[in-house]
Amino acid sequence: MSFNHLLNPGVKRREVFGWAMYDFANSGYTTVVITAVFAAYFVGAVADKAEWATLAWTSARLGGVG
């Protein structure tokens, strides 16, 4: 099945595939940074290892889910 008729004029399938691969890789990287790296930074540096830091980070992340 060909989807070439769905592309804008001048856009090649190769370009779409390249963008899809970039987006796939970037999504994984962003997920790791937000869930692991930035969480550790927030708890350790921003909140100075306070008892409430993990709860605050978790609550902030869950507040964005809707």
Image (cartoon, grey):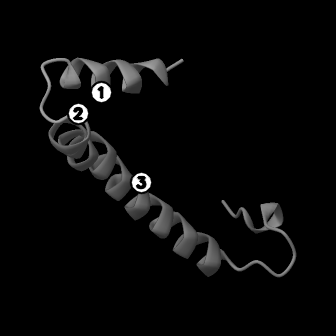
Closest to the observer: 54 or 47?
47
Q: Does residue 6 appear left or right of residue 49 in this picture?
A: right
Q: Residue at x 47, y 69 (%)?
A: 22
Image spot of residue 60 (x, y percent): 39, 24
Is 52 above or below relative to 44? above
Q: Which residue is mark 3?
A: 27
Q: Which mark is residue 46?
A: none
Q: Residues within 10 Å of mark 3 (few under 14, many from 20)?
A: few
Q: Dot 2 corresponds to which residue?
A: 47
Residue at the location (63% across, 78% down)?
15
Earlier residue among tags 3 and 1: 3
Q: Earlier in the sequence, mark 3 or mark 2?
A: 3
- Residue nearest the viewer, comparing 38 with 15: 38
Q: For numbered disc 3, what is the local secondary structure?
A: helix
Whether pointer 1 and pointer 2 mark residues with C-beta atoms closer than 8 Å, the reply is yes
With respect to residue 25, does 49 lie above or below? above
Residue type, mark 2 in image: Ala
Q: Amino acid at mark 3?
A: Ser
Residue 54 drawn at (x, y percent): 20, 24
Choose top left, top right, bottom left or bottom right for residue 7: bottom right
Q: Which residue is mark 1?
A: 57
Quadrant for the N terminus in the image: bottom right
Determine whether 61 is above or below 20 in the image.
above
List x then y, in percent, for residue 55: 24, 18
Kindly report which numbered mark, 1 or 2, lies closer to the viewer in this rendering: 2
